[in-house]
Image (cartoon, grey):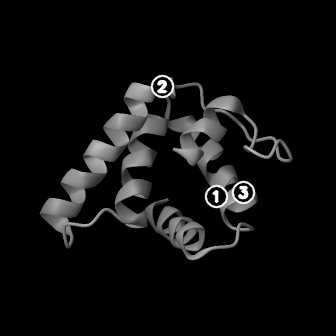
Amino acid sequence: MTVFRELRAGLTLDGQTKVKSPSTVMSTAEAISVLLNSGILAQHFGDGRIGAAEVARSLVGAVTKEDARDLVCLEEYLENVARPRKGGEWQAFYRAGKDVL
């Protein structure tokens, strides 16, 4: 949810970092779709638990569904926001995102 809110707003939650927003709609319905798709990926191709890899794969699809050029927004988000953040979840998301890209 944090990634979705920040990409939609074009600003991190703490207001410190501007991020490039994709041209595609980043709605609540899209966030739910990413979560649902992540669950399906985890159930059928993983161990049944949603992790960073499933979220990253699903997020790429949501961000690029209308324009593949929006992938740049996600790439910049990973480098400028996710990578510097502390915490295992953020680092796992960063690595999974880089692997998907």
Q: In front of the other: label 1 or label 2?
A: 2
Query: Which residue sits at x=47%, y=68%?
Result: 96
39 left or right of 1 in image: left
Residue 65 visible in the shown view: no
Mark 1 Cα-neighbour bin, 10 Å: few <14, some 14–19, many ≥20: many
- Separation (CA) of disc 1 from disc 3: 6 Å
Residue tagged by mark 3? 81
81 left or right of 55 in image: right
Query: Is residue 79 depicted above or below 58 in this figure?
Result: below
Along the polypeptide, which appears first: circle 1 or circle 2? Answer: 2
| Element type at mark 3 | helix
Amino acid type, label 3: Val
- Separation (CA) of disc 3 from disc 2: 20 Å
Q: Where's residue 67, x and y in %? A: 50, 29
Residue tagged by mark 1? 78
| Element type at mark 2 | loop
Query: Which residue sits at x=72%, y=57%?
Result: 81
The circle on residue 27 is 2
Q: Quadrant of residue 66?
A: top left
Q: How many marks?
A: 3
Marks 1,3: beta carbons within 8 A:
yes
Marks 3,2: beta carbons within 8 A:
no
Query: Is residue 19 depicted above or below 26 in this figure?
Result: below
Farthest residue toward the right? Answer: 16
Residue 83 visible in the shown view: yes
Amino acid type, label 2: Ser
| Element type at mark 1 | helix
